[in-house]
Image (tube, rainbow, N blue to C red):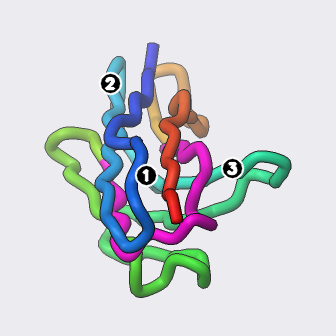
Amino acid sequence: QVQLVESGGGLVQAGGSLRLTCTASGNIFSIGVMGWYRQAPGKQRELVAVDISGGSANYADSVKGRFTISRDNAKNSVNLQMNSLKPEDTAVYYCNALIRTTSGQRLYWGQGTQVTVSS
């Protein structure tokens, strides 16, 4: 069984920083793409950043220059460093990962972590 567990969310003032971490555990053979999404109240879930195995990354326009995604392959984890936070960054943040196990490959999601940015 594979699990993704996020940590690092919380309450921060505008202009502050937070670092989210997502760690995958279980019967993992390999991990491909890992990414972060977010969902604000009343809105659809949206892509924040994705790290494509091999070093390239894509970001939503709204977070470019402020957020940085990074991976630690030895720990099966992905991080999201969030700087210069704005109230509009308030959302539940979810990580996902394309994981191959002995049963095949599919996309897994974490349970989400709340990020609240006060003005």
Instruction: Magenta stretch: give its range.
Output: 78-97
Judging depth in this view, the residue of 22 and 99 nearest the camera is 22
Question: Is residue 26 in view?
Answer: yes
Looking at numbered disc 2 in the image, what kind of residue is underneath it?
Ser
Instruction: Please give the residue where the numbered disc 1 appears in the rendered image.
Output: 32
> For this rendering, which residue is in front, 12 or 33?
12
Q: Counting other residues with Cα less than 10 Å from the Cα at mark 3, is it few (<14), some (14-19), or many (20 or more)?
A: some
86 left or right, relative to 16: right
| Neighbour tally class for label 1: few under 14, some 14-19, many 20 plus, Cα within 10 Å | some
- Helix, strand or loop status at disc 2: strand
Residue 51: x and y, percent?
42, 64
Residue 102 in the image: state x and y as whole percent: 44, 22
Mark 2 — residue? 25
Q: Which mark is residue 23?
A: none
- On the image, the x and y values in percent for residue 68 come to 35, 71
75 sits to left or right of 58: left
Residue extending furthest toward the front: 119
Q: Which amino acid does label 1 sit on?
A: Gly
